[in-house]
Every structure is written in structure tokens, then in C-alpha cells.
Image: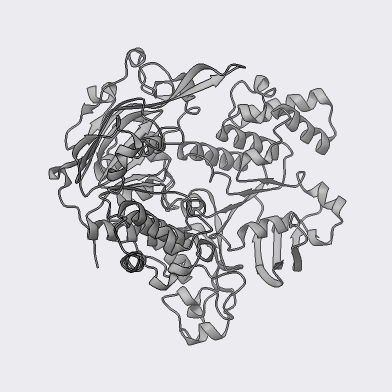
Amino acid sequence: METTMDTDKTLSKTLLEFQELKVHFPIHAGVFLRRVGEVKAVDGVSFALREGETLGLVGESGCGKTTTGKAIIRLVEPTGGKILFDSEKMGKVDLCPMTRSELRPIRSEIQMIFQDPYSSLNPRWSVGDIVAEPLKVHEPGMGHKEREERVAWLLEKVGLTGEQAHRYPHEFSGGQRQRVGIARALATRPRLVIADEPVSALDVSIQAQVINLMQDLQEEFGLTYLFIAHDLSVVEHISHRIAVMYLGNLMEIGPAEVLYRNPIHPYTKALISAVPLPDPRKTRPDRIQLQGEPPSPLNKPSGCAFRTRCPYAEPSCAEERPPLLDAGSDHQVACPIMMRE
Amino acid sequence: MDMDDQRPLLEVRDLRTYFQVEGQTAKAVDGVSFDIRENEVFGLVGESGSGKSVTSLSILRLIPNPPGEIVGGSIHFRGTNLLDLSWDEMRKIRGNRISMIFQEPMTALNPVFTIGFQLVETIRLHTGCGKEEAREKAAEMLSLVGIPDARKRLDDYPHQFSGGMRQRAMIAMALSLQPNLLIADEPTTALDVTIQAQILDLMVGLQKETDGASMLLITHDLAVVAETCQRVAVMYGGKIQEISPVIPLFEEPLHPYTKGLLLSLPHPDRERRKRLPTIPGIVPSILHMPPGCKFAERCPDRWERCDREEPELREIQPGRFCRCHLHDEEGA
């Protein structure tokens, strides 16, 4: 029954690697829609996903976590940097310079699960059609009968029944729709699944069901998850490693246990201490109250993006963007001040 | 006022709010009873469709009719049954005595008026004070809820505020009238965690400072309840399943549903990546509620009597109420 699999993921190979990924969105204004600036949604982010792991990507709204995930399958256009993917079909490739049609064969290896199970499924299609769609695109040679069997098999894998293939999304609850979304993502036998807030729209009693399902499927199919979420308790539970973003930059990355228990970056510390605990006796005297709110990504502070709210900021923080420094035990932190101590 | 100090601020008794949906009756709130004491933060938790928001809208008599209607029960606020009041009398209670904060602050603020205008209007409408005085009060309230440069920000429009600031402005508006009861429906659900922490601390801090004010906090988030509430009611299927002071509720939940909910939460003290205990099945449709216990089909402790007969909400220990046959004299 137990599916703990905390095997040493540090030894497994890299499946996908971001190298200085940048995604900037231009802002147009005025009568002639002149370009007046840009939002640096992702501003030079580097980290790697290891095969078979769950990497939790956390941060508050506007930090660029969703944009990072979307850049992989080109739902947004990268401005710079590399996304190296170890493809089964094409070997190691950089996804950034590829066109969408060049990407298509690889897209069967990378799939996405979305947050909102209500808007991510076409209401006019039966659940069977929804799950079969990626198969039609990526395995056009597959016969009708075989495809039907595969759909039924997939639905059973996610805890639904083959008979439910003929039903429509509105006949399903939120949790069941998310299961349909997962079945669709698994249809092409992907190796990497980008899950963008997959449980945050679900009720508490259903969240745990979907989290367990995702873990079971990971074990069975050897999936790698990029698990994007704002709920740190969920991320802490499901992830092998956690990466923390703030205003388009990576602040800290490390094993979930290490990062959650001994965060080093002042932003990670504040983020973790802000998470309410389901324990009325814990009063959190140690809560770090961040002053103010994140600055607009339109005018990011120079140097460290967090320095305007950081209780430990020094004049030097304004000079340059702090590099990721090694803190030992597979843990990296972009804060020279905390690393000095 | 000639008031008995022992009497609760709000007494909800056997409240029933039904909706007519496609020719059927949806019993969204079906016999809900609870008290909110003076100076208390009372939590109402439940999942979607449990009836928690309909309960709060019923207290303010904001149920859209049709399709909804309060068909029974009473809501006594300081001795007056709100359900007996005329629309005009109710308007005087709303805002003045009972204020509400909604989940989505953008939809609750009018986008074409400045924050200051909306605050000043609210204050003037309810207190009848002059324009200057009201503006003074508005600036004071904004800075009280932690908005820097409050006097200047009065001239901003809602879209110039971030989500957290809008929610602060809503809290300022709700509190500017010094209500006796503040109803907050998922006040931090749309906000980031660090902002959520700021807003919760702010609300609880203000509640403590304001003498005699009570708060009804409606949420799906048990962790938020643990951090802010003194007593909690857990709702499921339009009914209250358990009422308890917050510490025993988390340490020794009485109802199998409460137990299941608490166990299914990811918790940093729990072993990572271990399977989470789950509540099997899904919330039953409000149109097809089982005749017996509403939770029976998902309950690990179900027995034959649960399908037949709905349990009563009974006091099991002093101050602790539970709707479950397990706690009957005969036992399960």
C-alpha cells in the first residue's frame, strides 16, 4: 500500500534543464501601440528536472512559475535562454529555437495538467473523445478499436470506469474532471508532466484523492512532475525537491525536507512561516511578517528582486542579481548575505 | 441598552434556506442552529455545497428570491429576530450592526468610483456625519488596515490597488461602521499566502481591539480556522455536523467527517510522500441527499441505522456538539 519512494534522486539523470530562461512580455501603449516597456515574467532562471522526480515550483502570483511551465510547451514564447530536453525520439534538444511544428513529435513526451477542471475540458466532447484526442494527433496509425480500448484503460487507471467514456464533462464532479484531465495527459505516454495547480480548485476531501493518484501514476509509469502550486503544504508533501521563485527569479532550490525545515533565503523563510498550520496550539510567534507587497514586475528592483521587502537587505543587494550559491546537500540559495553567516 | 451579558450576540435556530432548481427543492441549509458569542471569532467550515455561504447570506437576508427562500427558523441578533424585520429595518442592520467581507474584493468594490468616495459615502450614509469628517475617518481607517500614504490613496480607483490592498480597503469599509458582527466569507482565499497572513493577523488584531465585536469566518481552509477561531462549526450536506471549541476539534474530532478531513490534510509533521488518508467518494448532490445521515455513504464507521435515521446534533461533552449515532447512549 505504501508508495514512499524516496530513493536517491540525486543520482538519476537530467530530463529537462532550464538555462537562463527568459520570458519577457512587451507592453504596448498609446495610439500607435508603441512598445513602452516589458514585463520580465521569467528573468534568467536556471534549474534542472531529474528523471522520476517531482519538483515543486512555488511562489506567489506573478512570480513567473506558471510562465516557466508554459514556456516548455510553447504556450508562451521564450525571449532567451535554453530549455534542454532529453527526448526519447530526438535525443538532447533545445526546445527554445524550435518551431511549433518541429516541437510536435516531442509534445507526446511532455504533457500538461491544468488548474481548472471546469474550463480545461471541452464541454461539447464526451470524456472518451477528450482522452482520445491526443492519441489521434500523436498516434494517427492507431485503429479505432485499439484507441477505444486504450481510452477505457486510461480511464480505469485514473479511477474512473470505461463506461464513463460516453459521458460529458458536466456529468462529473470537479475531482472526477481533474481525473479526466490526468487521463488525457497520460494518453501519449509522456515522460514529463507539467501540473499547474492541479489540486487547488478541488475540495479538501478530494485534494488528497488526486494527490495520491498522481503519486501512484508516477510510480507506475516513471513520470517526472513539474508541480506548480502556491499551496506550500501540498507541495511539501508531494515533492522530492522544491524551487522557490520571486518576481521572475529563482531564489532557492533544494530537497523538500531541507528547504521546508531549514530554509536559508529570507523570502523562503517568510513564505514558509506564512503558511497557516492545521494546529490551533501552534501560535507561530516566529512568523516573519513581510512588509508591503511584491513590487510590480514592470519596475523590478535592481539587483536582488526581493531586497525592497527583505529584513536583511544591505546596500550591496542593489548592485547585481545574486547568483545561486551552493549550500551543500543538493541545496542552492540566491542570497550572498545569508550564505555569509 | 438593557442587555443580558450572557446572551449570545447571534442565535441561529433551525434555519432552513431552500432553492427551487429545475422543479426540485435543493435544501441548501436544512435546520442549522448555532450561537455566536460577544467578542468571539466563530468559524464555519465546509466544502463547496455544504451550505456555509448560504448560511451567511441568510443572516444578512441576501438570499436571491426566487430561486431561494428562507423557509423556516429564526435568527436572533441581540434579541431581535432578523427574519421579522422589514426590508428597510434590515438595511439599517446591514453595514451598521452586521458587515460583510466577500471573497473577491474586486467585484465588491465599484470600479468607477475612487476608494475614498466609496468609503466616505458608506460612512456618511450610515453615520450621517459631514463630508470632511467622513473623509478624515476614511483616511484613518485605511491607515489602520495598513495602507501606507492613506490620505493620498483615497483618490485611487480600485484597479490601482492590488488584490491584498483591495481586501484591506474592504475590511476598512466593513469596520468603519463599527459593526457588532463582521461576517467574512473566504476573505483570504483569493490572496497569496504572505498577504493572507497579513490580512488574517489584521482581522484578528482589529477584532481584539474593537470592544465587543464578533466575527463569523466562513472558510474551507482548516488551517485558517486553527489560526484564527475560538469555536468552529463543521458543515456537510446543508447541516452542521459538529460544533466545538477549536483545540479539542483538532485534537479529538468527534464526527467521522471532521476526522477524515483533518487526516487528509498534508501536514509538515507527517511523513512526506506517504499516501494521504482519504475520504472516499464525492459530496452527494444537494438534490439527491440520502434520507439518513448525509455523510453515511462516505463514512468509515457507517452502520445500518445511519442510512435509516438521521442523527440529531447533540451535546456530547460540555460545549461540544456532534451529529452522529456513534455518540449515542447505545453506542454504535
Q: Quadrant of the C terminus of chain A?
A: top left
Q: Quadrant of residue A14?
A: top left
Q: Is residue B7 visible?
A: no
Label count reads 0
Residue under the image location 76 percent in, 64 percent down: B69
Q: Is residue B216 above or below residue A228?
A: below
Would you say B314 lies left or right of A148 here?
right
Q: Is residue B259 visible?
A: yes
Name the residue nearer the viewer: B39 or A193: A193
Name the residue nearer the viewer: B181 or B37: B181
x and y percentages locating residue A19 in the rendered image: 25, 29
Q: Is residue A138 above or below residue A14?
A: below
Name the residue nearer the viewer: B247 or A295: A295
x and y percentages locating residue A240 in the rendered image: 25, 47
x and y percentages locating residue A299 in the rendered image: 47, 19
The residue most toward the left is A11
Q: Quadrant of residue B70?
A: bottom right
Would you say A128 lies left or right of A255 here?
right
x and y percentages locating residue B317 in the rendered image: 52, 71
Name the residue nearer the viewer: B125 or A54: A54
